[in-house]
Amino acid sequence: MDKLELIQSAEAFIANSSDNRIKKESNTPRELVGERIYDPPIFGFCQASDAVFKVLKEPEVIGCHFRYPREWLPTAKTVISFFLPYSEAVKASNRQDKIWPSWGWLVGRVEGHRLLRSLLLQLEINLKKAGYATIVPTMDKKFFSITEPIVELCGEPLAFSSNWSERHIAYLCGLGTFGLSKGLITEKGVAGRFGSLVTELKLDPNQRPYEIYNAYCTQCGACVKQCPVKAISLEKGKDHRLCSIFLDKTAEKFKPRYGCGKCQVKVPCESNIPGRNR
């Protein structure tokens, strides 16, 4: 199996899956029925042994609880990361209301996440069938994500952290850099979802076409204005606590779905890198 075969299999999975279409429910806006959730994915690759992973152990980045690729899979050779951009229909629907997420965005966040997991499982199955041990860290029993502060690790309390970060992995795999809202800006923009796998299959790594973590962000402040609860500022970046509180409110209002995504739409980085042609 090579890069092209892997990428084409993922593209075909997303293109042909019936779960990549917004289905009709009693309150689904008519114009969204049948629209895609995701556009085709883009991929990035890096060596599992790359020394750059050490930076993620730093407390100001993730912390000592971050697990190296070879802590997930000792025989790992490659880390595979991909970005699933939301379709124009999903993004356009969420531009309309200033406060509450749109139906399309809620479906993209919840049903879209289930589809992302299905894609990860399919890629894992394909790699294993080809003879390469593979792990999806975020679906492994050793994975954990922290929202509320817990007992100190690494010398300081932890909150809003995990031992495998899709955005940081995508950054190291050359897919993009961080914005003011802490989203990752890719060539397809910031509006979408990330996934990753660790595998024995050896694939050539991507070059990282940037040198600093926020190279693609212009600090324009558009996401600051978009946030309905003022959780983003030019001075301090994103306040994860305020963001989390609002997400909880959307979960109450739109149960069983939740989401927001206002900082990912009506901004210059919504669908591309600011200042570059689409």
Image: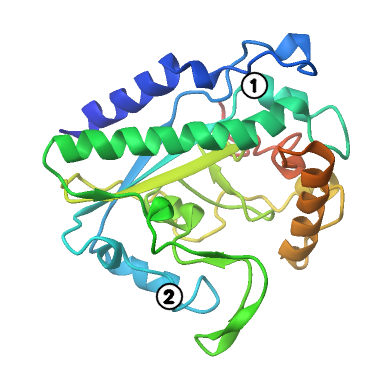
The residue that appears at 34% across and 67% down in the rendered structure is 52
Identity of the residue furthest to the bottom in this view: 155
| Count of residue discs | 2
163 over 230 or under it: above or below: below
The amino acid type, in three-letter code, at marker 2 is Lys
Residue 208 percent across, percent down from the top left = 37, 51
The amino acid type, in three-letter code, at marker 1 is Glu
Label 2's element? helix
Q: Earlier in the sequence, mark 2 or mark 1?
A: 2
Residue 14 percent across, percent down from the top left = 43, 22
The residue that appears at 57% across and 67% down in the rendered structure is 161
Label 1's element? helix
Left or right position of 164 against 240:
left
Residue 35 percent across, percent down from the top left = 62, 14
190 over 143 or under it: above or below: above
Q: Nearer the viewer, residue 77 or 217?
A: 77
Left or right position of 84 against 248:
left
Mark 2 and mark 1: Cα distance apart in space:
36 Å
The image quadrant that residue 254 belongs to is top right
Q: Which mark is residue 88?
A: 1
- Classify mark 1: residues with Cα within 10 Å, few (<14), some (14-19) or many (20+): some
The answer, for residue 271, to whether it is visible in the render is no
Residue 234 percent across, percent down from the top left = 77, 61
The image quadrant that residue 5 belongs to is top left
Left or right position of 28 against 134:
right
Image quarter (top left, top right, bottom left or bottom right) of the N terminus: top left
Q: Which mark is residue 57?
A: 2
The residue that appears at 17% across and 51% down in the rendered structure is 200
The answer, for residue 142, to whether it is visible in the render is yes
Image quarter (top left, top right, bottom left or bottom right) of the C terminus: top right
Q: How is the image coloured?
A: rainbow
